[in-house]
Image: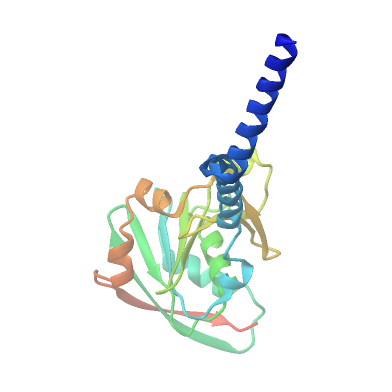
């Protein structure tokens, strides 16, 4: 009898503890698990992408190309060659400008050059086609800047070989969303590849002063290039 009474007392105590857990602050654990679920949901939301291919097409950007390389003899000559790619017909003269910032030559795209695809092509074109080409950049970075959004595209031969890519550039928005851009087909592929640099690390690693470029706190030299119209 004593043993049965003891078992009943233990059982009643467990029931009482369970009731207290359900109705009092012991529900803290439920709150904790609920908070974990909420935090996981917020993390998922934060990982959702804000920007897409369409954001590259905005006409609100000021666009620049930064190039350097021991075999880069003349950016004007490279741009002239690019302008002659379409068949001869109607022509248009664009006014580019350039400056020397340390090892970098920075080219400011003309304000009336609205073709985002053409801009991406120029970034790639300046890399040239060695060894046949004897006037080419080793590194080319396209920088598009606006008040609300900026992004950069750049070449990385080692990473391109690792991923078995062809005519592609790597890109990153200033919120560090990364992408791969196929130049001939204008294909935009979202990427989480950790070897694609973040926006700030790309500029910092290459000693590029973003704020100076954004404010154009340097002297630009104008030059004209004749383009065959498509």
Locate residue 117, reporting x and y percent: 60, 71
- The residue located at (66%, 21%) in the rendering is 9
Placement of 30 over or under 149, stated as above or below: above
Q: In which quarter of the image is the N terminus?
A: top right
Locate residue 53: give its quadrant.
bottom right
Dividing the picture into quadrants, the one containing residue 118 is bottom right
Q: Which quadrant of the rendered structure holds the C terminus?
A: bottom right
What is the x, y in percent for residue 199?
Answer: 44, 55
Q: Residue at x 68, y 15 (%)?
A: 6
Q: Percent position (x, y) of residue 33?
A: 59, 42
Location of residue 30 with respect to 151 vertically, above or below: above
Residue at 59% in and 45% down: 23
| Residue 108 seen in the figure | yes
Quarter of image, res 83: bottom right
Q: Is residue 5 left or right of residue 180?
A: right
- Figure colour scheme: rainbow
Residue 128 shows in the view: no
Kindly identify the residue that appears in the image at 47 percent across and 80 percent down: 60
């Amino acid at each position: 009898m004593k043993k049965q009474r003891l078992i009943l007392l233990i059982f009643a105590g467990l029931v009482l503890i369970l009731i207290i857990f359900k109705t009092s602050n012991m529900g803290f654990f439920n709150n904790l698990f609920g908070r974990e679920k909420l935090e996981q949901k917020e993390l998922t939301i934060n990982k959702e992408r804000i920007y897409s291919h369409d954001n590259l097409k905005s006409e609100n950007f000021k666009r620049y190309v930064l190039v350097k390389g021991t075999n880069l003899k003349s950016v004007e000559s490279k741009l002239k060659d690019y302008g002659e790619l379409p068949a001869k017909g109607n022509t248009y003269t664009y006014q580019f400008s350039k400056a020397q910032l340390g090892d970098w030559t920075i080219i400011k795209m003309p304000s009336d050059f609205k073709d985002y695809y053409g801009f991406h092509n120029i970034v790639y074109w300046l890399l040239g086609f060695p060894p046949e080409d004897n006037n080419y950049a080793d590194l080319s970075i396209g920088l598009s800047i606006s008040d609300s959004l900026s992004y950069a595209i750049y070449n990385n031969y080692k990473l391109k070989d690792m991923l078995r890519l062809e005519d592609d550039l790597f890109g990153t928005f200033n919120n560090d969303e990364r992408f791969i851009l196929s130049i001939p087909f204008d294909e935009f592929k979202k990427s989480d590849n950790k070897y694609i640099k973040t926006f700030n690390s790309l500029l910092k690693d290459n000693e590029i002063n973003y704020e100076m470029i954004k404010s154009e706190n340097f002297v630009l030299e104008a030059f004209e290039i004749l383009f065959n119209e498509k």
